[in-house]
Image (cartoon, rainbow, N blue to C red):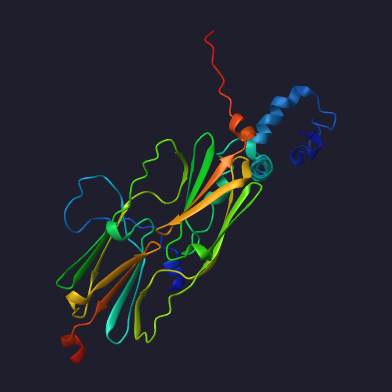
Amino acid sequence: MDFKLLPSKWLSKKNSLSASRDNSSELNEHKEEHPVYSLQSEMNRLFDDFFRATEMPMLGRSFALSPFTAFEQNGLTPRIDVRETDKELRISAELPGLNESEIDVSLSRDMLTISGEKKQESEQNVKGWYRMERSYGSFTRSVSLPCEVEQDSCSAVFKNGVLTVSLTKTPQAQTSTKSITIKKE
Amino acid sequence: MTSAIAERKKEEVATPQTGEPIRNRRVFVPLADIYETKDRLFILADMPGVDEQSIDITLEKNVLTINGFTAPNTENELKLVHCECPEGNYRRVFALSEEVDRDGIEATVKNGVLKLILPKSQKSMTR
């Protein structure tokens, strides 16, 4: 932490730019109460979350999944479940009312994208509508994957309005988790 | 109106109207479209994971009940890491305002959508 960036210290005579380590405890106190610090830590946290999820997908899965927990729920964005084993990643999406030919699934490195268009069934001579709760139109949903997957061993099945995409983890991703034994001292 | 509908999430039925389930499974309200033509009523209901065998439709007087049952996920080796579509059945009850010809009801399930065609009875058509 650069001391020069402390606005609260700029005007104080006691703490000049040549601050010694002695007042580091005082610094820490300021850190907790000053709004600049809370803003800064909040910004750091946001940046961390963002970059960890995009650049370092192998570090784990809790954060890598967070970008798609915050998606906006509208009637069209498909809801998804993610399941995994040591070797496999399986993503299922609810897409009622679509044909398999109307769904597009693509994989680019660590991003799986499901898109498509749900068309309204046109019925002739509709006299009146009583309820219209289902949505129609095009949608897209991207999922950032928690680990690296084999690019060419990807399969998808569509059954009863549920799309299931199976992805195989790369050998590196499979071995990236290592359990650490805890010794008793 | 559309935004209010868009905000609807997978709603759970608060209290099942009839009977208490033996198994502890969630019950969701499927979203539905209802429209009519001159001689028929159409109901479309989104029930992903349901096929023709796992659906139960009853019409009692003017109360139409749709029950859809989804198969529980039996692959235990798969660990669920992110869940937006919790397991559960579907149930929705409609009160029909017009007399329906019971024998002519057609139900099809395709791609997780139930389509019900309810022909209006002659009595209600001539009224």
Residue ID at (36%, 49%): B87
Does residue B89 appear to the left or right of A162 in the view shown?
left
Does residue A54 appear to the left or right of A4 in the view shown?
left
Residue ID at (32%, 52%): B70
Camera-side residue: B88 or A34? B88
Q: Position of residue A162 (x, y in %)?
A: 43, 56
Q: The N terminus of chain A is located in which quarter?
A: top right
Q: State the residue lying farthest toward the top.
A: A185
**Vertical side of B99 occupied by B76: above or below:** above
Camera-side residue: A164 or A140? A164
Does residue B32 appear to the left or right of A17 in the view shown?
left
**Vertical side of B16 occupied by B121: above or below:** below
Residue B127 can be seen in this image: no
Q: State the residue lying farthest toward the right.
A: A18
Q: The C terminus of chain A is located in which quarter?
A: top right
**Vertical side of B61 occupied by A70: above or below:** above
Camera-side residue: A25 or B22? B22
Q: Where is residue A26 in the image (x, y as percent from the top left)?
A: 70, 28
Count of number-bearing discs: 0
Residue ID at (46%, 60%): A95
**Vertical side of B84 occupied by A15: above or below:** above
**Toward which corner of the image does residue B89 lie, by quadrant?**
bottom left
Does residue B33 appear to the left or right of B23 in the view shown?
right
**Toward which corner of the image does residue B24 lie, by quadrant?**
top left
Q: Position of residue B69 (x, y in %)?
A: 29, 54
Residue A126 can be seen in this image: yes
Q: Position of residue A80 (x, y in %)?
A: 48, 52
